[in-house]
Image (cartoon, helix red, strand yellow):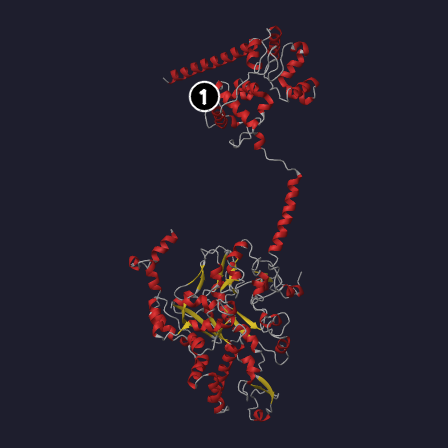
Amino acid sequence: MRQSCSDVILVTAVFVLGSVSGLAAQDQTERVAGSGQELFQTRCAVCHTIGGGRLVGPDLEGVDERRSEEWIIAFVQHSQQMVAAGDPDAVAIFEQYSQIMMPDQALYDEEIRGIIEYIRTAEPTAPVQPVALGEPTEEQILLGQQLFQGRARFANGGPTCNSCHEVTHEAVLGGGLLARDLTAVHSRLGAPGVKAILGSPPFPLMQRAYQDKPLTDEEVIALAGFLQQADAEQALHQPRDYGRNLLFAGVVGTVILLGLYASFWSGRLKGSVNQSIYDRQVKST
Amino acid sequence: MDVRSQISMVFHLDKCIGCHTCSIACKNIWTDRKGAEYMWWNNVETKPGTGYPGKWEDQRIYKGGWEKKGDGIDLKGAGKPQSLTNIFHNPHMPVIDDYYEPFTYKYLDLIESPAGDDQPTARPISMITGEPMDIKMGPNWDDDLSGTPDYARKDPNLEKLSPAEQEAMFQMERMAFFYLPRICNHCLNPACVASCPSGAIYKRGEDGVVLINQSVCRAWRMCVTACPYKKSYYNWNTGKSEKCILCYPRIEAGHAPACMHSCVGRIRYLGVLLYDADRIEDVASADEAEVVSRQMDMILDPFDPPVIEAAKQNGIADSTIDAAQYSPTYKFVKRWNLALPLHPEFRTLPMLFYVPPLLPVMASVTKADNTAQSAGMNPIAKHWPDSWLYDTSTAALFGTIDEARFPLQYMANLFSAGDTAKVGDRLKKLMAVRLHRRRVTVGDVAEDTVSEALATTGLTPQTADDIYYLTSLAQFDDRFVIPAAHREQALEMMEFAGDVKGNTGFGFKNATAERGS
């Protein structure tokens, strides 16, 4: 009996290990073999178009003609390093696109070549017209605010925004510091950009966080509305910067207050009534 | 008529020898604790002198007591508006250097120092910081220092005297001083009670002892400013103010307060006075010249049937009324009109009265031939080879009172708000009693001189003998007539003692169990 038990365990272990490694191998081959089109749709299309004009990032039509393949691969994999290193083209793009960093993509060189290949051969899409959205309704903004703070849950169970993000807004107290402050995200990315990122996050960490828990369209609209409102009202929530005047006013105020105290309590007891005696006494030290 | 009882005190200043035993007795019982070292609930001052804390009588410095405002009175420095505006920093409080920095000596160094060429010394150590210090001041630093520029000549009571009078006080051979023992006056109109923002200070209904509730006190220290006698002290360790409690645990047990019990000169008397509480406001806001006499009027005759009736209606026990009738303070203050309150111009209506001192104003030194007297003495007897006579008798009745070594004005500034007639009146009575007794015991004063002295002061030989008895011969029970406290009744108002009968004592076992568990 004891023998058969261990046999069962052994057989089970072999099956489990086999299936896991089999899955991993399958994933690997799929990724390598994954067509440039598929990768483009999942990784790039959120911010880029092919002939559809500027979205968040530049239109990628003819990118292989503008830049060398090596440069594209390097930029896709670590654009921020290149900007920091002072690559003139990278810096120019960074400046041109409102200093929005392109997130580093964890893609193999081969995969990127596949994407470039797809871009070269793809049919140019129709120009994307920023959808003229109506102003978000009060209810939507309120829902967005609640979603942002976690007062309302995302339908698919995604983590609440303020676990990583902060927004300067009267209704939101203390957001996370792991990711960017989203107060001005609306003016940086525009409503389509915000919605695009929310719908399909291009940032690796955010991607992982919402992998199987995508936001619904309704939630995206609500959050975008809330962020738009927070952006519009941010001036109201920013303390005014007085610069050196604050210090100066503090010093002057202190002097005035001390003067007032000194005059109001000018009749106070100062020192001891015996001071003249103490002054004449011989001290040992 | 709202009759209430007050345990009051009389200090007979002629009898005080300035030994400070009272101060030590009090210190040992009550203020030998951390934070209380600098407090002397009882202290003895030399007058003229600045006292403790320095210049406490000068209310331009300390802003204590009441002052007349229109028809009423108001606290000088610690009333409600002043308290509110100064609540976080009380600007008129004495500092520790106004009292003195308490110290002890490092006595262990005397016996534990290693052998060496030098004699070990015990260095003075501050009882506040624990560090070695220079002793700068003590609670009786001006002791016996009449005439000194730092102390005697800065006595605030000298101010109303002319420069010539002041100078005369400090002439060689004329210079004198007397002692002024002070405790809390347990006033009828206490400024400390009125000033307390926390309502922690109260005057006990049954005997008028003024107490600070230590669990209510919030250390605002307004009482320290408000008390013109500076008899409320702040304990820097507990963060509460403290003051003389008239040894109420002793009084309730029928014992005299420690300072009185230990008094070497037997100068202290304690007894009940009945007074009319309805008149407190009128008396306290009377014109300065009238405050003393109206305070005397407020004290009621315990033999008067309507007074007894009203007292009983107010719940004053028969034993208390009985004590009031035998009260030595009633005799000194009211019946014989011999005692006066200290600084009545502060308007707190103090219930500690002083018989003003006669001695320093009465004696004179004249040249006399002592040879005959010396010749008649045994050769080994002590005799004085000089030819001075320290003369306390006088040919002219009360002559020396009017040509006193202490100007009467000085005494009046202390005891009667500057009214010399009141002090003079009392000193003349004391003089008349002395003349009368001199005639009885020595017989060198003519009878008509004595009769005239007694008649002028309104005394009979019998009264003079009574005064003499209570001054010089009085026994313990004559000096301290302490009414029964009836604590058992007070206790039963709070709890029914029968509930805990059968336990160890009444409620004792329960209380112990609660504390221990």
Q: Quadrant of the C terminus of chain A?
A: bottom right
- Residue positioned most to the front: B70
B480 or A241: nearer the eye?
A: A241
A173 or B301: nearer the eye?
A: B301
Q: Secondary structure at mark 1?
A: loop
Circle 1 Cα neighbour tier, 10 Å, few/some/many (<14 / 14–19 / ≥20): few
Q: At x 61% / y 5%, what residue is drawn?
A: A121
The number of numbered discs placed on residues in the rendered structure image is 1
In the rendered view, would you say B129 is above or below B247? above
Q: Quadrant of the N terminus of chain A?
A: top left
Q: Would residue A67 be found to the left or right of residue B283 on screen? A: right
> Looking at the rendering, which quadrant does residue A236 occupy?
top right
In the rendered view, would you say B333 is above or below B62? below
Q: Which residue is mark 1?
A: A155
Q: Would residue B267 be found to the left or right of residue B507 on screen? A: right
Give the chain letter at badge 1: A
User: x%, y% of residue B433?
Assistant: 47, 84
Q: Would residue B37 be found to the left or right of residue B135 on screen? A: left
Amino acid under disc 1: Ala
Can residue A203 be spotted in the picture? Answer: no
In the rendered view, would you say B484 is above or below A254? below
User: x%, y% of residue B499?
Assistant: 29, 57
B407 or B436: nearer the eye?
A: B407
In the rendered view, would you say A102 is above or below B479? above
Can residue B275 be spotted in the picture? Answer: yes
User: x%, y% of residue B291?
Assistant: 49, 71
